[in-house]
Amino acid sequence: MSETKTAPTGPDDLSAERLTSAPEESDGPVGMGVLGWVRWMWRQLTSMRVALILLFMLSLAAIPGSLIPQNSQNAFKVQTWKSTHQGITPLYEKLQLFDVYSSVWFSAIYILLFVSLAGCIVPRTWQFVGVLRAQPPAAPRNLTRMPVYAAWRTDAGPEAVNAAAHRLLRGRRFRADLAGGAVAAEKGYLREVGNLLFHFSLFALLAGFAWASLGSGQGGKLVIEGQGFSNTTTQLDDFTGSAFYTTDDLDAFGFKLDGFTAKYQATGEQIGSAREFTAHIRYWKGTDASALTKGSIQVNHPLEIGDSKVFLIGHGYAPVVTVRNAKGDVVYKGPTPFLPQDSNLTSTGVIKVSDYGDKDGKHTQLGFNGYFLPTAPVNFEQTGPVSLFPDAAEPMLVITAYAGDLGTDSGLPQNIYQLDTTHLTQLKQDGDIARARLKPGQGWELPDGYGSITFDGYQQWASFSVSHRPGNAIALAGAVCAILGLIGSLFVQRRRIWVRATAGPDGTTLVEMAGLARSESARTAEELAEFAVRLQDDAPALDDAPALDDGTGDGTGAGADDTPAAPAIPAPATPADPDSKE
């Protein structure tokens, strides 16, 4: 059976036992009518329980954002996902699952958590400031009620004992107050400082994310070796701004991609794993493109220019082809980026030739759909066109050809990586689909006199993300401070010690000591015992003093035997919870 704890009997006892500045929670409305319910709901919202529930809900709400493609991160990937899952796409759009972090339901949880933290921090900080300005709570009338208690008799006077106790406690960095014939001391304020720091840091973390959401912007650009771009709206492939960051706020800079280094593991169990991705660039700041500075961009090592960071997010190959019409005129020449489909960089892409010319009296356009294989197998009749290794050891271009109308003159936007075959006719040869497998330097004479295509080689491309996120530093600082605050709140123990020396009828002085900690810990009893031993240098225990109750209830306390050592200090029999009423 658990030991019954005596309830505090007065306001002094209540203030002495309360070791936290957290606001007290109410189990129901504190008033009548609407005002009472508003107060009760506000207290519930600002309680720790509701804050933890909202934090858990926010964590769950962020899961769809990591599993489902987001418009703010990759709009092309979202369109691809929608085309693959057309049945469930309308439901996802209604639930705003493609824009999770800007959705109504995610914002509602976010704002409620923000308000909950603010409503918790302000009163708690104010109360803690009051605690710091006030003296430690006076000693309770009955010290034997404390979880850790000890007593002995001495010949030293009460004033001398109290003065010695006050001096020793201050020497141990306790906040001590000598008043009313007793010494009250308190230590471990860093625990509450840690709690407040954790709350402030979490508030700053949320504020940093909110600022990043309102003042951030991100653009994407795919650059082929030998080419470059300027950080302008017209040259970015895509751009996502925010309320306080638009295209007018883009930093003025640009760079040229001189080369790209990609290294892969060639042997072992992790064959094909990437070991190095480095984009070698020359960049400029401002509008003067002639003042170039050499640099490099690697994965997780962005290039910082002004308030923007340029991240390397992708890599692939761009086959270089030359297309000639039936007259032998070059109608298309250059690299075309193909998109990787697997870890071995099996890439797919399309080549659109919109300036082919006339064929049989009609304006004709050509389209090529195909695969680029960095390391092609000898025979892929059964496996299909797949690459065996991500590096370009045996490059091959596998293509099919179409003729007709590409739809580029309709004025409607098109995906450059997809071929609209609505008004195209696939070329055939010997009654079968016309296709070719080309190695660098090889050409293909197109059927039906449509000219030829030559695979000249390949170039590498790299995709970059230009990001402006002003709240990242605040969020990072908040996360670090939150960890520090949590460490302080877990490992620093808030405790109080009281010493009371009173003159007895026999002329001796009764010295009573008691300790109280916010949580159960053997360290409280050990600390009180160490302090009692030090105090006995000034107030030594009498050898023939009668036995005193030390809080154990068995009548065997300090002075019960012939050993004048330190007083017996019992370990707490129940958790040292000052508010428990079992």
Image (cartoon, rainbow, N blue to C red):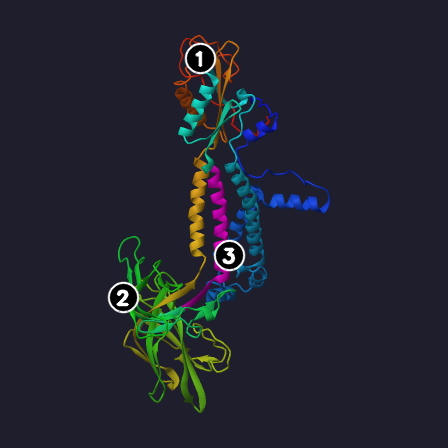
Real-space Cα distance between discs 1 and 2?
Answer: 96 Å
Q: Mark 1: few, some, or many residues within 10 Å (few <14, many ≥20)?
A: some
Residue depicted at 45% across the width and 89% down the height: 362
Residues shaded magenta: 191-220
Residue occupied by mark 3: 210
Q: Mark 2: few, some, or many residues within 10 Å (few <14, many ≥20)?
A: few
Numbered disc 2: secondary structure: loop
Viewer-nearest of discs 2 and 3: 3
Give whichever of 416, 155 is nearer the camera: 155
Residue occupied by mark 2: 393
Q: Mark 3: few, some, or many residues within 10 Å (few <14, many ≥20)?
A: some
Whichever of labels 2 and 3 marks the residue nearer the N terminus, that label is 3
Q: Could you say which disc has been placed on residue 116 in the image?
A: none
Q: Main secondary structure of the magenta part?
A: helix
- Which quadrant does the C terminus fall into? top right
Residue occupied by mark 1: 155
